[in-house]
Amino acid sequence: MDFNYVLRVGWNSTSCQNYTPPMAEPKTSQNSGVPCCQTLLSLYGIALAQRLKPTSQFRLPNLPTSISCLQDFKSKLSWLSHSDGLSISDNVVSYCLDPVQFVITPDTCSRIQSTQDWVRQLGRSTELDSACRPDLTNLTDCDKCVSAGFKVRDELISRDSNTTHARVCFLFTILYAAGIVNEFGPESEGAVSCIFGLLTESQVGFPQTGKVTQSKKLSAALVGIIATITTVMLILSAASVYYWRRKKVAKREGRGDLNCDLAVGLCDTEKQITDFIQSCQFKEDEKKGIDVPFVVFESIRAATDEFSEANRLGQGGFGPVYKGKFPGGQEVAIKRLSSSSGQGLQEFKNEVLLIAKLQHRNLVRLLGYCVEGDEKILLYEFMPNKSLDLFIFDRTLCLLLNWEIRFSIILGIARGLVYLHHDSRLRIIHRDLKTSNVLLDEEMNPKISDFGLARIVGGKQTEASTTKVVGTYGYMSPEYAFDGSFSIKSDVFSFGVMVLEIISGKRNTGFYNSEQALSLLGYAWKLWNENKALDLMDITLSETCNANEFLRCVNIGLLCVQEDPSDRPTMSNVVFMLGSEIAILPCPKQPAFVARRHISSSDSSSKPLSVNELTATSEQGR
């Protein structure tokens, strides 16, 4: 969900200023009456309403999604705190909002889960559809909307015949009114104040009019609804279990309170983050800047069955990766720092700090970390389909990737890079983009991973340089490989290589046109100039491919791998070009690395390649 509205709607944060939740575990009956919790519940409801129209779902599909969304919400509030001086306690979101209460359950309010279910129960038009449609800043219109809301709720209850579902039915009514019916949308001042009951900054300092009073009534109803939706948590999240165990270990060892998973702010500035990454140790107080739970080593060892070979998923530059299964059935990917990894500590510190602060559906999500003795471990969401390269370069598995899936993967990777380069609170250059660093979830959605080599660039800066180049041969831009200069355009180059690999099914590093000694980039360029770009197509796509989209991808791929960085598009422009069927795309210039560099058998091993202090991994099949 997109929580940028938190920065736009101008909600009044007075109730949360300097509010510090009690140390005790939150209970619904306790926090439902807290003014700050009321405000945050209503504010979060806007996101649920925004999500309703594109997804048709009233609530979230599962607990991990709900946890992730609350982390995004918390990050946005934290950003607001740093930029606007809003003083909100670090753990107030965790205290006020329980992720379980936002997860859909079938047995509730006439078994409604989606807008389609809503229409089946009530028809396509109800009193709500007319009463809540106009600008609700008008007092009379707001009253009509609120009255209609109660009537529709009563109709749902009568159909459900279970009065205990009344609160849930009214929640759905509120979300439908704001997300589907109101012409101005959930972010409009009328919806914010009338439907969600939030006092806006424009209303502060004025007498409480009837409109505000009505809003408070609706807000109180919304808080009561959301606060009592969940009854019993059947499965505790693994993070909660290990957080509790961590507190017991800390108490036993006399280390005091190590509740660092909710601490925000110690390493939030670019300088502090850079200092942390460049330091040669992992100090105890630095852990307080990490936004994910600490997981004790004994639990990880048990989850991986003592790091058994049966649970081993693969080997990366960081070290081995294992599959872990925790109580409750939660599966995670576990990356264990290898003692032989020359850059292991730096990579570990990069990932544990940066990814914890990056939240996007096309970036792999960090769930926890462990630092005990010599052990340094990262826990990620488990990706059942592993990495993209295993599919596109395998002549059997590639059959599972039709054109629609491949195009969706390309677009997803592009959106993830837009977030890294432009939209996240830290401007990140990945520096090691390749198909093996793109993971696929159960629905083949791509997620960029492996941020061990990523670098932060400050403010509006978009480039930097280094004397030690690290990356993977075949994906590095020429200016980075030979001059040590890297920028967001270096990532664009790597993206272009991936696009050409995805649509052709051929590795850039493994491709060889014997007639003219061309690289994959050179071969694509040759076909483009001969108006034979469709010949680049993976043969398995012949029946499913959209020719216009394919040619657009070839064009975009070649634009991204142009030799001069200034000629390459930004990732924002790439997303626009991918999504536009009518845009006229620029003609690409000759790409870099047209001729294939010959690699001897000794060069093509796992040893690094050296070019002016260049450290590069030669990409191999797995």
Image: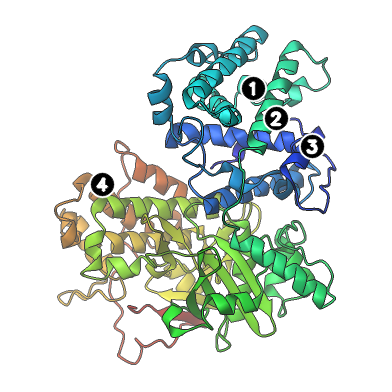
Q: Quadrant of residue 440?
A: bottom left
Q: Which mark is residue 549?
A: 4
Q: CA distance from mark 2 to mark 1?
A: 9 Å
Q: CA distance from mark 2 to mark 4?
A: 41 Å
Give the mark toward the camera: 1 or 4: 1
**Mark 4 or mark 2, which is nearer the start of the sequence?**
2
User: Badge 4 local density, few (<14 within 10 Å), some, or many (20+)?
Assistant: some
The residue nearer to you, when weighing 161 against 284, is: 161
User: Badge 3 local density, few (<14 within 10 Å), some, or many (20+)?
Assistant: some
**Mark 4 or mark 3, which is nearer the start of the sequence?**
3
Q: Which mark is residue 34?
A: 3
Q: CA distance from mark 1 to mark 4?
A: 40 Å
Q: What secondary structure is found at the residue carrying circle 3?
A: loop
Instruction: Please identify the residue farthest to the top as the structure is shown.
Output: 140
Residue displayed at 58% across by 88% down = 339
Q: Tell me the residue that label 2 is attached to.
A: 10
Pointers 2 and 1 in contact (C-beta within 8 Å): yes
Residue displayed at 55% across by 68% down = 326
Give the mark toward the camera: 2 or 4: 2
Q: From the viewer's perspective, is residue 74 above or below residue 204?
A: below
Q: CA distance from mark 2 to mark 3?
A: 21 Å
Residue 483 in the image: x percent, y percent?
50, 73
Q: Tell me the residue that label 1 is attached to.
A: 189
User: Badge 1 local density, few (<14 within 10 Å), some, or many (20+)?
Assistant: many
Q: Mark 3: which amino acid? A: Val
Q: Is residue 78 left or right of residue 451?
A: right
Q: Mark 2: which amino acid? A: Gly
Residue displayed at 65% across by 26% down = 196
The residue nearer to you, when weighing 97 against 138, is: 97
